[in-house]
Image (tube, rainbow, N blue to C red):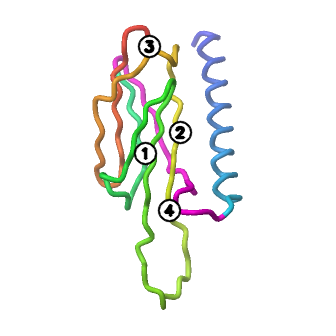
Amino acid sequence: MRSRDLSTWMWGEALSLLEQADRLHRQFFRVAGSEATPTWEPPADVVESADSLQVHIALPGVAADSITVVIEPGGVVVSALRPFPCREIEAHIHRIEIPYGRFERRIMLPLEDPYIPMDLVGKQLVDGLLTLTFRKKEGA
């Protein structure tokens, strides 16, 4: 492995750990707000091939028609609402571990030039996994 590849990988790993720490901090120390305020972030994977990038986001319980995808320079923003399934007023909740409410996930894509736009060529939600497929453009 070339030293440049190792250096790039190390910086990528460091940035990934910082993003993860930031997400955990926001999740555990969030202030209760309105439903319009994003309150959680789903886990995501980014996979790159020679001609495309795929972003996989775990969204069980989220309706496909409620998902918004916005492409920004260098990344993508995915947002939606996962409603709380139990609307019983008299229910006694013993445990809540699954996050509910609005979410927003900003994902930076590994691009050499973040201002070369990507084409979103596929958006598919299957079994709670959202897959976004981007075709790389010349120079990306």
Give me the disc on residue 101. 4
Picture quarter containing residue 17? top right
Calculate the distance from the C-alpha at mark 3 to the C-alpha at mark 2.
20 Å
Cα–Cα span, label 3 and label 1 = 23 Å
Q: Is residue 50 left or right of residue 43?
A: left
Residue 16 found in image quarter: top right
Element type at marker 2?
strand
- Label 4 vs label 3, nearer the camera: 4
Q: Are marks 2 and 4 in contact (CB under 8 Å)?
A: no
| Range of magenta residues | 32-51
Q: Residue at x 39, y 27 (%)?
A: 53
Identify the residue under disc 3.
140
x then y, percent, for residue 129: 36, 49
Q: Is residue 35 above or below residue 106?
A: below
Q: Which is more N-terminal, label 1 or label 2? A: 1
**Element at badge 1?**
strand
Residue 4 shown left or right of residue 124 in the figure: right
Inspect the image, locate mark 1, and give the three-letter code of the amino acid beneath it: Ile
**Numbered badge on residue 57:** 1
Query: Are the residues at dot 3 and dot 2 in contact (C-beta closer than 8 Å)?
Result: no
Sequence order check, earlier mark of 3 and 2: 2
Q: Return the residue at label 2.
A: 106
Q: Which residue is depicted at the point 43% across and 8% down?
A: 139
> Is tag 4's residue or tag 1's residue first in the polypeptide sequence?
1
The reply to whether discs 3 and 1 touch (Cβ–Cβ < 8 Å) is: no
Camera-nearest residue between 137 and 54:
137
